[in-house]
Amino acid sequence: MAVPRLLCFHKQGTSARTRFVRWPHGMLAFEPLPADARLRDEMSALAVRQHPAAVLADAAARLGMSADALRAETEFEAVIATPEGEVPVLLVQFTALDPPFAEVEKHGGKFIAITEARDVGALELALLRKAYEILIG
């Protein structure tokens, strides 16, 4: 099974300000997608889905954070089709009161508003749109 990519965000508890992490290669952590990747319309392509706990623990460790610093948004479901196979995408929230700017910056990432992502590819824009619809309800 392919390692899931993570679409990371922080939602401010007091103001609901939502920011996504833009990594040096794009919107998904921790590796770029192949150029010919495309968003699948159906989730049924993955017969077996990996539980997010191990993926979140690994991501938190990579970022130098505690395991409870990340939480998967369970309503979000997306799969990317690549020549190597299907890649699940998880929508992952940073749970701290404030965005972990330093930890993300150590990996070349930056928190941005969705409006600052206009220049990313169509696939990543579609993922952002799908995530935003879930986050704003």
Image: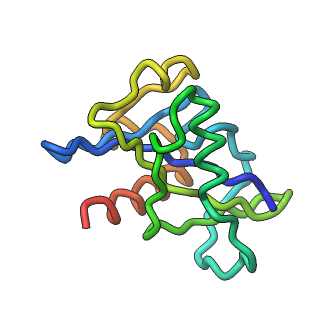
Residue placed furthest toward the right: 84
Q: Position of residue 27 (x, y in %)?
A: 53, 40
Q: Return the residue found at the far left.
A: 15
Q: Nearer the viewer, residue 49 or 38?
A: 49
Vertical comparison of 130 with 111: above or below: below
Which residue is at the front of the view, 46 or 71? 71
* Image-based side of 109 in relation to 49, left or right: left
Residue 114 lies in quadrant: top left
The image shows residue 50 at horizontal and vertical percentages of 69, 65
Task: Name the residue at 57% across, 48% down.
Answer: 6
Please, which colouring scheme is shown? Answer: rainbow
Q: Residue at x 33, y 39 (%)?
A: 19
Asked whether 75 or 42 is in front, the reply is: 75
Q: Position of residue 125 (x, y in %)?
A: 46, 51
Q: Quadrant of the C terminus?
A: bottom left
- Give the residue displayed 66% in from the left and 61% down from the top: 88
Relative placement, left or right, of 40 versus 124 is: right
| Residue 128 at x, y percent in the picture | 43, 53
